Image (spheres, helix red, strand yellow):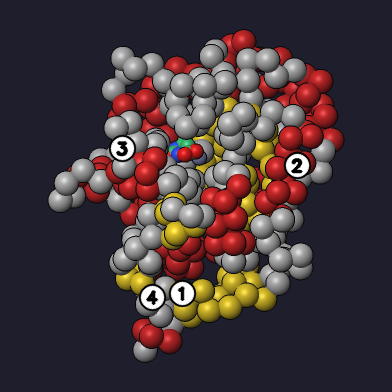
Amino acid sequence: MSENLTLTIAQPDDWHVHFRQGAIMAQVVPHTAARFARAMVMPNLSPPIVTVAQARNYRAEIMATLPADAKFNPLMSLYLTDHTTRQQVTEAAAAQHIVGYKLYPAASTTNSARGVTRVSNIMPVLEGMAEHRLVLQVHAEVSDPEVDIFDREAVFIEQILAPLHREIPDLKIIVEHVTTAQGVQFVQQTGDQVAATITAHHLMFNRNEMFRGGLRPHAYCLPVLKRESHRLALRKAAASGSRAFFAGTDSAPHTRQSKQRDYGCAGIYSAHAAMELYVEVFESMQALEKLEGFASHHGADFYGLARNAGKLTLQKKPWRAPPSYRFGRQHEIIPLCAGQPIAWSIAGRDC
Ligand code: DOR
Ligand code: ZN
């Protein structure tokens, strides 16, 4: 009976998430903590998280949104700038809970104004990261407005990431939220120092979703949804069992007001149903047996961290995502699949 179908896997981790700060953070963190044992918290706040002290304070703010006995471990990423120093890298490597640096090409996405203007300017810092085994998490898109937005990932990989990998082959690199067949191929063709995270929404939708029945700001994220052939390449990679691909939701909450306006923000909020949607995707690919590796093992292995000992049980029992999550006095987040049925539920955790 399909209603009784359950799936128990090692507790998963979300290797790419945005929590923000303040009231919106208090709204979203419990969704992630209810599903994942750990999460890799992105540092693109305003101002960005660039120092160990800032990361420590931010982590404490995150933990303060949860009950004191919550079993959730946020892992922190620092924001690379043109001014990051080797000394800072050494300090980051020694700090508990900091496992990587996020490379935002300047002007590529939300709060990337202080990102890196030329990767060639920060080579000594990247060499320091390789020495210390810190992971480079890359927003792999060029920000050149002359380049077609659908080509920005492929161009970045060809012009910047592939040469960087050849130059520093020991540097662990993650192509964050990979969206293209070219990105998948790059990861597959390089050795085990290069991996990629894949979001649920890029596995579920192609670019038509942004225009289905009218312009849909809540389906707009960066890297932008791509054509169907790319979605199929991502699905094949996720279901392949390759250790180079793992879950990273890129859950990126913005208020309804900041998405539905001239110059709406990029970001899809998926933390409320992240594992439920991943399992639905794997079921649709007849690859349920590959979910545990993708969601619970490959990321920890790549980062050189222990796999989680706890378990998460999912059940094929439908529920309906709310049309919005209201918080504060007048704000709301419109989640992925707002108001729509979701086939799987969280049935329990043992951690
Ligand atoms: O859609 C996105 N939202 N892509 C990013 O790269 C950043 C993120 C955010 O922080 O809103
Ligand atoms: Zn992100």
The mark lying in front, picked from 1 and 3, is 3
Residue under the point 42% across and 73% down: 344
The answer to whether residue 229 of the structure is visible from this angle is: no
Mark 2 or mark 4, earlier in chain: 2
306 left or right of 219 in image: right
Residue matched to label 1 = 345
The amino acid at mark 3 is Arg
The amino acid at mark 4 is Trp
Residue positioned most to the bottom: 1
Residue positioned most to the left: 213
Residue positioned most to the top: 121
Residue positioned most to the front: 329
Residue 46's disc is none
Assess disc 4: are there few (<14), some (14-19) or many (≥20) residues with their C-alpha within 10 Å of its C-alpha.
few
Q: Residue 77: percent from the left, percent from the top?
A: 66, 38
Residue 273 to residue 93: above or below = below
Mark 1 lies on a secondary structure that is: strand
17 left or right of 228 in image: right
The amino acid at mark 1 is Ser
Residue under the point 62% across and 67% down: 10
Residue 57's disc is 2
> In the image shown, does 256 or 81 lie closer to the viewer?
256
The answer to whether residue 51 of the structure is visible from this angle is: yes
Mark 1 or mark 3, earlier in chain: 3
Query: What's the CA distance linking mark 2 and mark 4?
Result: 36 Å
Residue 72 to residue 44: above or below = below
Q: Residue 73: percent from the left, percent from the top?
A: 71, 55
Residue matched to label 3 = 261
